[in-house]
Image: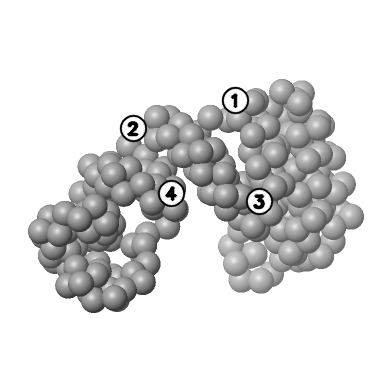
Amino acid sequence: MSLARQHHEAEGIALLRADLATHPDDTDARRLLIRLLAVASDLPAARTEVELLAKSLPPGDPSAFIELGHAFELVHQFDDALAAYETASERAPGSPLGPREAGLRAAHWGEWDVARTWLEEALRRGARTPEVWHALGLVRLNLHDLDGARDAYRSGALADPKEVDCWLGLATVAMAAEDWTGALAAYDGVLARRPGWGDGELGRAWALARLGRRDEAARALDRAESLGADARALQKQRGLLAGAPSKAASPAVPP
């Protein structure tokens, strides 16, 4: 790893091959070798190592092909990466790892329809983590399925009581639906888990303003300012409260 960070990939590859010659079951070394071979643009050799890794793993473990997908991503061959994740899914039909990785990566690339298919398959196979639920919520939101996005974010929030991102997702869905009461409840949920967050107070102020609760909104804006919230968003929201014409955007927080 140190050699790779210094861009001495060839030396790193030689070192790993020497290790594997005497310790062929060193799966961590073989995983790293796959990635270094990809960085060195030797994808045929990387594929060979993937097959060797697959043979050394327990039956039904798809992680060798997930490593191949990561290798393709390193050289920006994203279609090939997705195909590797699909292979991982096919090789281990009972494991959520292949569809989970395919869905998360497709969501990262903005391939919403593809991501939805794979994330829903991962959930069917048991990958019911906040990360997967959150990604599915974001995907459904971008596909304009507000009810589906809300359900996904709620499921993610239930999966981990300390989770914050899914509460932010619920706030985003509520704002998209112009459900200001729901947005306020979601921001209250965010702040219960991340107290003292300025942009969370900013979101709460925005929901209060939309509900016509101007005094409470003003106090929330003061709190947001004291906590270092986004200055431009603060200015817009103060203009809204003052009655100035405004096209104030939603608070500067991610879905």
- Front-most of 194 and 169? 169
Residue at which label 3 appears: 112
- In the rendered view of the protein, which quadrant contains the N terminus? bottom right
User: Which mark is first along the chain, 4 or 3?
Assistant: 3
In whole angstroms, how far apart are the C-alphas of marks 3 and 2? 27 Å
Disc 4, SS: loop
Tell me if label 3 and label 1 are in contact, CB under 8 Å.
Answer: no
The residue under label 2 is which amino acid type? Pro
The residue under label 3 is which amino acid type? Trp
In whole angstroms, how far apart are the C-alphas of marks 3 and 4? 20 Å
* Residue 161: mark: 2
In whole angstroms, how far apart are the C-alphas of marks 1 and 4? 30 Å
- Between tags 3 and 1, which lies in front? 3
Q: Is residue 251 above or below residue 93?
A: below
In whole angstroms, how far apart are the C-alphas of marks 4 and 2? 24 Å
Residue that appears at 24% across and 44% down: 188
Quarter-of-image position of residue 198 = bottom left
In whole angstroms, how far apart are the C-alphas of marks 2 and 1? 19 Å
In whole angstroms, how far apart are the C-alphas of marks 3 and 1? 21 Å
Residue that appears at 75% across and 58% down: 78
User: Which mark is first along the chain, 2 or 4?
Assistant: 2
